[in-house]
Image (tube, rainbow, N blue to C red):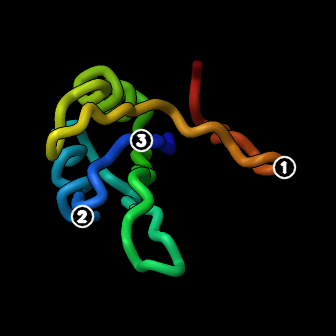
Amino acid sequence: MKLLIRNLARTTTEAELQAMFEPYGTIQSCTLVIDKETGKSKGFGFVEMPMPGEAKAAIKNLNYTEVDGTKIRVKKAEPKPGEQPDSNESS
């Protein structure tokens, strides 16, 4: 399940983001969205967790928690238009 993490502090690193989610299960990928012009974080990123139950636990426990002075928001990422939704998930 791909998760969208919003409202991250611009100083939060990919390593810190990954460390936040590791207690909840296996992480397939972890990506911060970086501004091409400035090279700095845009304040959001994605974490992909292969096990839906682990991803849901991460959402439940991390949504609206304070990290680096801001309350992050964690939810299931919506597929891009034309992109196939994850086929191994149950809603």
Q: Position of residue 35 (x, y in %)?
A: 49, 71
- For the residue pair 34 and 82, the one nearer the viewer reads as 34
- In the rendered structure, which amino acid carries the disc numbered 1? Gly
Q: Residue at x 26, y 32 (%)?
A: 71
- Label 2, label 3: how far apart the Cα atoms are: 13 Å
Q: CA distance from mark 1 to mark 2?
A: 30 Å
| Outermost right residue | 82
Residue 32 in the image: above or below residue 44: below
Q: Amino acid at mark 3?
A: Arg
Q: Check the image and report above or below for 62 versus 32.
A: above
Determine the CA span between mark 3 and mark 1.
23 Å
The residue beneath circle 3 is: 6
In this view, the residue in front, 74 or 82, is 74
Residue 36 in the image, given as x and y percentages of width and height: 53, 78
Where, quadrant-wise, is the C terminus in this rendering?
Answer: top right
In the image, 57: left or right of 2?
left
Q: Are marks 3 and 1 in contact (CB under 8 Å)?
A: no
Q: Earlier in the sequence, mark 1 or mark 2?
A: 2
Kindly identify the residue that appears in the image at 46 percent across and 63 percent down.
33
Q: Nearer the viewer, mark 3 or mark 1?
A: 3
**Residue 45 in the image: above or below residue 79:** below
Residue 22 at x, y = what percent? 20, 48
Which residue occupies the extreme front position in the image? Answer: 38
Residues packed near mark 1 inside 10 Å, few (<14), some (14 to 19) or many (20 plus): few
Give the secondary structure at mark 1.
Answer: loop
Could you tell me which secondary element the residue under label 2 belongs to? loop
Which residue: 52% across, 80% down?
Answer: 37
Q: Residue at x 46, y 30 (%)?
A: 75
Which residue is identified by label 2? 13
Q: Nearer the viewer, residue 6 or 24?
A: 6
Q: How many marks?
A: 3
* Residue identifier under label 1: 82
